[in-house]
Every structure is written in C-alpha cells, then in structure tokens.
Image: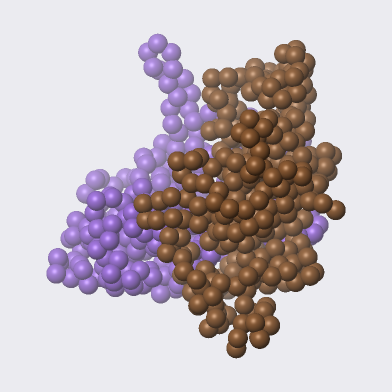
C-alpha cells in the first residue's frame, strides 16, 4: 500500500542569534490512509516544526526547509505552487493547534468561521454552508448548535473551542488531519472527550491523523504508529504496542521509565540525567550520548543511522548495529 | 490530633462580582467554599482538581498570601489569619510557597545568588558574611552548580529554574511548603528529576508539603493523603492507596478513568463526563457535581451532600456513598 504521506530526508533549519538550529534533521515519516501516527518528544525536539514543514507554514523570516521531499497523495508538496498549497490547506490537509483561542478570530461568530473554508474550498452557497456549519457543530458533540453558531469565541470554554477547531478542520473532509498538542491545554476530563471525538472521526471518515504530543499516555491511546524525536532527529519508529512493550532506543526507554503511571507506584522514579543539548552546538556525536546510560565509545564521535529492523521498527542507536559496523 | 501541623477549618474565599451603575456587589465567585482538612507533620498532602477548582486559591489563602473570607487556618496551633503584620512576617520563613513558573517570580536583573540570599538578609536570619556560604550549600542540595550563583534567571532552563524556586523556599529552612503545580510545565525527563528532588528534600529536612497538581499520576507518586476538589469544594479526601484503588466519589472515579495510561490496548471502563465545569460564580444547587454526574438522583439536585467521614480517615461528599 502506498502511503498517503511520505516524508524523506526532510530538514528544516531555523536562524537564531546563536547560529543555525537544525529544528528538523533528516526526518523520515510515513502516514497511511486511515492511520494515526504520533510524533512524541519533549519541548524543542522538532515535532511541531515537522508538522509546520509538512503544511509549508514555516515563516520565511524564521527559517526554511533546506532539503528533502514531502510526498502527499502522489505530489511533492515542496514543488507545488503557493496558490496550490493554499488550496490544499484546509481542504485535503487540515490542522488543529494547542491554543484554539488564538487560532480563531475574536470578532467573527463561530458559525461564520466554520462557513468560511466550506464556501472557499467547496463552493457552497451561504445558505448551504450555514446548514453544514450547524451540522458540523452537532457532529463534534456540542448541543444547542444553532445558538453556538451565533456566539463568539470568548463565550465558549476551551474544550468547546477545541471542538469548533475540529469542526473547521474536518469541514472539507481532509485526507490528513494534523493535530499539534490538541489536548495539552485542556483538563483531563475534557481531554478524554476530545480524544474520543478524534477517534470517532478517524473510524468513521477514515481520516489519517498525524498527532503531535509530549504525553506518552495520549500516544498509547491514540497511535497506530509512533515516531520518537530527540533534538530534531527521529530516534525510533515503531508500531504502538511494540514500542511500549519493548522500547529499543535508550531515550524511549528512559522516557517510559521516568513517567509516573497511575496504580503503578514505585519508590523512586527513574530520571534521565542532564538536559536536552543546546541545538546550536550539536556535533557529530549521537545527540543523546551524554544522557545515555548505555553509551559506547562510537556514540561520542559518530551519529547512528536510522536503521530498519525489517519488523516495522526502526531505531537510530549504535547498540543495535552489528559489532563489525560500530567497530568494537 | 497533636501531630497536625496545619488545620484548615471551614475555609472560604469569595471574590465579589460588582455590577450596575454604582458598582455594587451583585454576587460572589466562590473560589474556595467551605473547605476543611488537616495536614500532619512530615506528610505530603495532595490537592487535585481541574482548572478553576480552587486548589491554588486554597493554597494561597492558607499561607495568607490572600485574605480569607471566612474560616480558620491554624499552623502549629497559630491562627494565621489573626496575626498582625509583624507577627505574620515573623512566621513567613517557616511557611514557603513554590510557584509553577519560578521565572515570573524572579527579578530578571538580579543574579541568582543574590535572589536566593535576599530573603535571609531581609529577615535577619543570617549575618551577611554567612549568606553566600548558605546559598551555595542549598544550591548544591537542589542540584545547582556553584558557578550558577552569578548567573541571571534567563540563563537557566525550565528544570533549573524550578530548582531555583525550590532552593529559594528551602533557604528559609521552612517547616511547611505549599508547592503549586511545580512540575506541570516541565518535560517528562526533567519532571522526574524534580519529583525525586522533592522526595529527597523531604526526607533530609523533615518537610511537610501541600502539593497542588492537576496531574493524578504525579500526585499518586508523591502524596500520602489526597483531597479532590471540584468548584471550590472538597469532594473526597482519602489516604493515597484507598483513593487510587477504590475511589468513592463519582467525580474521583471519572477523573481517574480519564487519565491516559501509557499502556496501549489496555481496556478500561472509562467514565467520560459530559459538558464543562460550571462557573464558580453560579454553581449548581444541591451537589455541585450533579450537572455532570452519571449517577445523579433527585436528592442531588436539591440537597448539598455533607462532607463526612465514611470510614477511618476517608471523607466524601456524596449522597450515594
């Protein structure tokens, strides 16, 4: 089966006063039709930058895509014109963000904001778009849809606004929905509602979802496949069950061990020592080597390639290379 | 009980809502509404709840960073809200507060060493000549290096800033610390470091914590007893193991079942609550949780359930328990 999204060797660099930041460094990523892929990692690992690159939304003043290919439904998005890209966004590709309040226009009603992309992309009349907007509000589980359509963003709670964002995102039946930390700002009981809603959309419309999160619990609930990122690089790719049962990369192992888990209390939490490296001073070493408890000599001088294990799993770590390759 | 370090009795904190031509008070936001609990010496008491449940306001009113509306807070027998300014100031070093974002509570133009030593000098706890030594000692204890002493707040990462926040509290040699979401803004790998630091410091210095958090897994890890808040009131209070293994209040059950577990394919009975938390300015009559409770009965809409002890050290406010 051909993948809906196939990203190869994608690098996005940001300019900063301290130097160039390799926000996304040779990213490989595949999302199949109807599948949820989670990108997980800590702040600054490049997970959002990867999504923004895919949408071609990296502001020129900040940085740019320097290499790679972004194949979406048979087209390289790096080669399509700006105008064509604009048509794709909100139509075949849709995105929801962490802060719904800052993505909605405060002076337009909820209804108007849902109608806009429908009229723009699907050419519906105002009246038809109005009816569709109300249908969509009901679809995302908000009661009193007609009243809500007439209200303004400030009148709704965070959870309701995120539902509205989802309504806008799915309004044109996108093939890929990118969700960038969509529940991070919400309380757990509201988060449970939103995750349920996203699963329902995926099941009913076969929408592929690229879900970006730092929360391993959310990953376990949502993902079919998981991509773990660290300092701009993909360190591990795996189907979700295998990743949690037998994490391969020492970073993934450390992440899973440092998270307190409900009803599995331990006397002391494992903690990964140190902190994320400064992105402007990264050398040739494995970026994780100085925090790794299984560090080898080669890790300090050479970056491990992302190796395909042939079982649907990939890992970038010298521990999994043949000894002849790592030279020990 | 003699071993109670802190007693909170029927504490209320209301904020007036003003309106109309003359700005008269037309209602109240009941941020903390009749909350009672006690904290024993050496324990970590957890307050959990969603945003707007009043857990931070409770913490701040306990330390009298906010004035109470009604009720009583006794710290080692002292009525905190009856003290005059001087007496309160004398008590302050013994009760410290740690914020979620220590960066916003640090002066960007003051070096860390100075910021940490400031309160010691202010309160006259140590002579000037010994302050630096003490600062370095506490910094080491909190995992900060000696060369950090001359750096400015912006030069630190999130985890290090939280270490500074903790160091600043520890500096005063307190008995009691209110920690308000101290690990919520941190990444998992750093969060674990800070959680362990809290546990180590408690052991070394016999500290008592009030730990405020919305993250139930963190609370389970650190706390000995836990109170669950909803719309300004305590719904349930229980020792850790009882609360997590056998929650009694429907809200606690829903909250626990909502936490995503890092265990894929684990089938759980999930209670997904409908709707949002109502406004604390206009809380529902009867049980405050009745609008979202999956087990709601007629009585819940009419009568406020009493917060009562159902078995030793287990309290719950629910008609159905």
Residue B7 drawn at (x, y percent): 45, 54
Query: Image height check: is B204 above or below A79?
Result: below
Query: Image height check: is B239 above or below B53?
Result: below
Q: Is residue B177 left or right of residue B123?
A: right
Residue B248 drawn at (x, y percent): 70, 52
Q: Quadrant of the C terminus of chain A?
A: bottom right
Residue A68 drawn at (x, y percent): 62, 53
Q: Colour of chain A?
A: brown
Point 61% across, 82% down: residue: A326
Point 63% across, 30% down: residue: A83
Q: Nearer the viewer, residue A287 or A305?
A: A305
The quadrant holding residue A194 is: top right
Q: How is the image coloured?
A: by chain
Q: Is residue B103 left or right of residue A292?
A: left
Asked if residue A57 shows in the view, the reply is yes
Total marks placed: 0
Point 53% across, 64% down: residue: B189
Q: Nearer the viewer, residue A233 or A291?
A: A233
Residue A133 drawn at (x, y percent): 73, 22
Asked if residue B314 shows in the view, the reply is no
Point 48% across, 28% down: residue: B28
Query: Image height check: is A42 above or below A308?
Result: above
Q: Which chain is purple?
A: B
């Amino acid at each position: 089966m051909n993948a809906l999204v196939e990203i190869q060797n994608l690098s996005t660099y940001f300019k900063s006063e301290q130097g160039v930041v390799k926000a996304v460094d040779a990213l490989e990523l595949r999302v199949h039709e109807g599948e949820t892929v989670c990108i997980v990692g800590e702040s600054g690992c490049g997970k959002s930058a990867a999504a923004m690159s895919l949408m071609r939304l990296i502001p020129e003043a900040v940085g740019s895509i320097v290499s790679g290919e972004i194949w979406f439904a048979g087209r390289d998005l790096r080669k399509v014109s700006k105008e064509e890209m604009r048509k794709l966004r909100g139509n075949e590709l849709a995105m929801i963000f962490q802060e719904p309040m800052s993505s909605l226009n405060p002076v337009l009603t909820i209804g108007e904001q849902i109608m806009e992309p429908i009229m723009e992309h699907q050419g519906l009349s105002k009246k038809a778009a109005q009816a569709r907007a109300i249908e969509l509000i009901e679809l995302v589980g908000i009661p009193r849809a007609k009243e809500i359509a007439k209200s303004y963003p400030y009148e709704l709670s965070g959870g309701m606004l995120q539902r509205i964002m989802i309504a806008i995102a799915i309004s044109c039946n996108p093939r890929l929905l990118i969700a960038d930390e969509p529940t991070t700002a919400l309380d757990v009981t509201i988060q449970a509602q939103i995750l349920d809603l996203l699963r329902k959309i995926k099941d009913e419309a076969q929408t592929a979802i690229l879900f970006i999160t730092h929360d391993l619990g959310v990953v376990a609930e949502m993902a079919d496949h998981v991509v773990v990122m660290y300092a701009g690089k993909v360190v591990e790719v795996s189907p979700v069950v295998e990743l949690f049962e037998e994490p391969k990369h020492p970073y993934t192992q450390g992440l899973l061990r440092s998270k307190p888990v409900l009803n599995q209390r331990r006397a002391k939490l494992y903690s990964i020592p140190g902190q994320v490296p400064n992105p402007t001073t990264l050398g040739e070493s494995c970026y994780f080597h100085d925090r790794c408890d299984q560090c080898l000599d080669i890790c300090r001088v050479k970056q491990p390639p992302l190796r395909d294990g042939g079982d649907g799993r990939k890992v970038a770590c010298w521990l999994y290379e043949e000894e002849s390759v790592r030279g020990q | 009980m003699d071993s109670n370090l802190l007693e909170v009795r029927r504490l209320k904190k209301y904020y007036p809502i003003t309106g109309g031509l003359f700005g008269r008070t037309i209602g109240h936001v009941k941020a903390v509404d009749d909350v009672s609990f006690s904290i024993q010496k050496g324990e970590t008491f957890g307050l959990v709840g969603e945003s707007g449940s009043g857990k931070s306001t409770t913490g701040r009113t306990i330390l009298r960073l906010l004035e109470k509306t009604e009720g009583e807070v006794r710290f080692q027998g002292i009525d905190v809200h009856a003290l005059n300014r001087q007496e309160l100031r004398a008590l302050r070093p013994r009760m410290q507060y740690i914020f979620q974002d220590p960066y916003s509570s640090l002066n960007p133009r003051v070096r860390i060493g100075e910021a940490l030593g400031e309160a010691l000098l202010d309160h006259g706890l140590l002579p000037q000549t010994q302050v630096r030594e003490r600062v370095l000692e506490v910094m080491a204890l909190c995992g900060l290096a000696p060369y950090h002493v001359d750096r400015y707040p912006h030069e630190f990462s999130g985890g290090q800033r939280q270490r500074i926040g903790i160091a600043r509290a520890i500096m005063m040699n307190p008995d009691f610390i209110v920690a308000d979401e101290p690990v919520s803004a941190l990444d998992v790998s750093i969060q674990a470091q800070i959680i362990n630091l809290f546990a180590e410091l408690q052991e070394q210095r016999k500290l008592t914590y009030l730990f405020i958090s919305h993250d139930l897994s963190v609370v389970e890890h650190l706390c000995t007893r836990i109170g669950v808040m909803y719309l300004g009131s305590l719904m349930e209070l229980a020792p850790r193991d009882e609360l997590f293994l056998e929650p009694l209040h429907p809200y606690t059950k829903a909250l626990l079942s909502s936490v995503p577990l890092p265990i894929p394919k684990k089938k759980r009975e999930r209670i997904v609550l409908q709707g949002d938390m109502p406004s604390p300015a206009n809380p529902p009559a009867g049980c405050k949780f009745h609008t979202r409770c999956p087990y709601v009965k007629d009585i819940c809409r009419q009568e406020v359930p009493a917060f009562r002890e159902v078995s030793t050290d287990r309290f719950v406010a629910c008609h159905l328990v």
